[in-house]
Image (cartoon, helix red, strand yellow):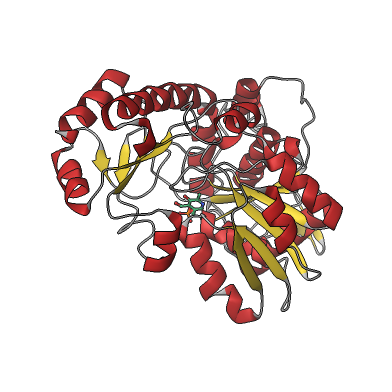
Amino acid sequence: MSDKRPTRGFATRAIHHGQEPETVTGAVNVPIFLTSTYQYEAIEKTRSGHDYARATNPTRDAIEESLCSLEGGTSAHVFGSGMAAISALCTMMKSGDHVVCTNNVYGGTSRVFDHVFAGYGIQFSYVDTSDAAHVAVAIRPETRLVHIETPTNPMMQVTDIRAVAEVCRTKGVELSVDNTFLSPYLQRPLELGADIVMHSTTKFLNGHSDGLGGVLVCTKPEQAERFRYVQKTTGGILSPFECYLLLRGVKTLAVRMRQHDANGRAVAEFLAKRLGADKVNYPGLKTHPQHELAARQQKGFGSMLSMELGSRERAQAFVGRLNLCLLAESLGGVETLVCHPYTMTHAGTSVETKARMGVTQGLIRISVGIEDTEDIVADLEQALG
Ligand code: PLP
């Protein structure tokens, strides 16, 4: 699988690539192939190359081709959730191997590393990857993978993908990037030297908060072979219906991301004026310590931000007064979602780690949706009281 027409623009590929009209009827949408198995013509002779739906499904083939094209990879492999994709990534490792990971990652990522895969003898080190020198120091002879998240959840720290990719290349280690917060519309890690891109497609790629999913986009034939085998043998694949939801979501990715980006900037500027720029974590603010890096490696700043309200009581009062924005886990949907990382996304993270990360009881994360900008700002303004 590869992008046969890379010269076409992003929005065009999001609508057409992998989503050509169906050949039997000309239907412009890829059908949802609800079948677990496929008829053979004879022994060892399938009708269409498909034999059993855990291995392949045409709706899944379509979304994999689409996501592969959007990230500029050579193959894509979808799984039942972002966590299933991260778990599939860990199957690259064997006992004794070592992984270097951003210290500020999504709580579920460090949880599956430390509480599931560490039990199989894989070792994990957490470092501040915003300085590539820390990555170089953390790499050991047994290191197989560096896994980074940029910007991070929820502190919005940015890692220089090109610089870390260079460190990985010289040390012979693979680099994977969790690109969930920006989507390929705003950031394309493979173009900056990463080997694998991972997404929770539950977020911006789906975009409508109505389906879970995860993807690994690869650059090498041996990775493709590995993850296709993992899909077939471990079975944590994405269902045809959720593949369809994702195909439908991806068609509007470009327009949604443009509006997410515009609303994110407007909300961050409003909050910086209202609370002080030092209380708002958003790489689009000139006061953000890595603003210039973000401006260089991203096509926009996106719509994820966090703000410090100073105490749990203030955070509680703020969320209690919201009328339009919804207090909920997750992110990347069309609706503005507000979350209290300390008790929600990072509930399973130790108190010490949260303190080290800056995840306080007064921290609020906002996934700015694509409602009218003035309505979002008005709701936040009245809720701040
Ligand atoms: N990566 C990031 C950055 C996330 O925010 C999340 C979930 O919030 C995940 C991975 C896990 O994805 P999922 O919830 O689809 O399993």
Question: Relative to 301, is 59 on the left or the right?
Answer: right
Q: In which image quadrant can residue 107 be found? A: bottom left
* Above-or-below relation of 77 to 355: above
Position of residue 339 measured from the top left corner of the image (x, y, whole percent): 31, 47
Identity of the residue drawn at 33% across and 34% down: 335
Q: In which image quadrant can residue 22 be found? A: top right
Task: Report the quarter where the N terminus lies.
Answer: top right
Position of residue 336 measured from the top left corner of the image (x, y, whole percent): 32, 35
Of 102 and 9, nearer the camera is 102
Identity of the residue drawn at 70% across and 34% down: 69
Question: Relative to 373, is 34 on the left or the right?
Answer: right
Question: Relative to 320, is 290 on the left or the right?
Answer: right
* Above-or-below relation of 63 to 57: above
Identity of the residue drawn at 26% across and 27% down: 274
Task: Report the quarter where the C terminus lies.
Answer: top left
Residue 208 seen in the current view = no
Report the label total.
0
Identity of the residue drawn at 51% across and 47% down: 152
Of 255 and 108, nearer the camera is 108
Position of residue 170 measured from the top left corner of the image (x, y, whole percent): 85, 52
* Above-or-below relation of 315 to 249: below
Residue 9 seen in the current view = yes
